[in-house]
Amino acid sequence: MEIVDTLNKELLVRNREKNKGCSLDAELYKNTALSYCKIENAIAVLSDMQEDKSYVYFSGTAAELGIDSSENPKIIDSIWEEDILKRIHPDDKLKKYIHELRFFRMLETIDFKERSDFSVLSKLRMRDRNGHYRLVRHRMFYFYSPYHLKLRFALCLYNIAVNQSLHLSPEFMIINTAKGEVVSEDRLTYKNVLSAREMEILKYIGDGFTSKEIAGILSISINTVSRHRQNILEKLKVKNSVKAFNKGFWK
């Protein structure tokens, strides 16, 4: 997926090159993740951007979601925890990646001393141990190195949402926790503008599929795909379909 490649490039490569001298105490952040896990009964994932490694701490939430917690903590050689990610609804996972990239790029533009005021708050649909989708509250915090002012750790917390009402939809927000303000909300809300088929095609465009590939996947003609793409451009007032997908997320 193109968005994952972009995240890896921005979160890992750039930081690995520039953070060689970062001497933050990883044990301190591991203990922070463990504390959240115990106090909030959350799944806590601490990702080390310098080492491309994650530490996953499990709680009762893991059992409800059917996630194997025989290793606790589980240490993996990646910042991506696939046992968790594979349970997220595909549409929500794509939005999650986009949202995290927006968050990173936003923090890169503000003063280092103010970055700790911000975090991500999301509601995602995740499959539970019975294969049913449930709303899960996801929070993410970034920790920057005072040595090079670059991202070192990311902490993700997962809890099953209290309100499971069927009418609730996934949410993606960036918040200023110091002020209690929503800084940015998910703007991939084209459902009021685009048809269901146009939304579907826009998603495939975002995943990097060509018109021919989209036509094959959806069992429609290339001309039909082209017509939908043109409609998307006109409705969203952009010059190309990639900009339609990227609008509001990448910059």
Image (cartoon, helix red, strand yellow):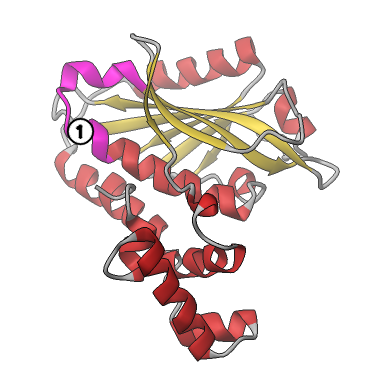
Using the image as rendered, state which of residue 95 and residue 225 is in the foreground: 225
**Residue occupying the point 22% across, 42% down:** 15
| Residue 22 image offset from top left, x and y in percent | 20, 29
Q: Nearer the viewer, residue 76 or 123?
A: 123
Q: Which residues are magenta?
A: 105-118
Residue 176 coordinates in the image, percent (x, y) = 35, 18
Can residue 77 be seen here? The reply is no
Query: Does 40 appear above or below 94?
Result: above
Q: Is residue 58 left or right of residue 241?
A: right
Residue 218 position by quadrant:
bottom right
Q: Main secondary structure of the magenta part?
A: helix
Examine the image and state in which quarter residue 123 appears. top right
Residue displayed at 63% across by 22% down: 42
Front residue of this view, candidates 27 and 47: 47
Q: Is residue 101 above or below residue 246?
A: above
Image side of residue 11 versus residue 19, left or right: right
Q: Could you tell me the amino acid type at mark 1?
A: Lys
Q: Is residue 97 visible?
A: yes
Q: Specify the quadrant that holds the N terminus.
A: bottom left
Q: Is residue 37 magenta?
A: no
Q: Is residue 112 magenta?
A: yes
- Note whether 68 is above or below 183 in the view shown: below
Residue 108 location (% of width, % of height): 20, 35
Q: Residues within 10 Å of mark 1 (few under 14, many from 20)?
A: many
- Which quadrant of the view contains residue 130? top right
Q: Which residue is mark 1?
A: 150
Horizontal relation, residue 240 to residue 124: left or right? left
* x and y, in percent, of residue 106 in the image: 25, 35
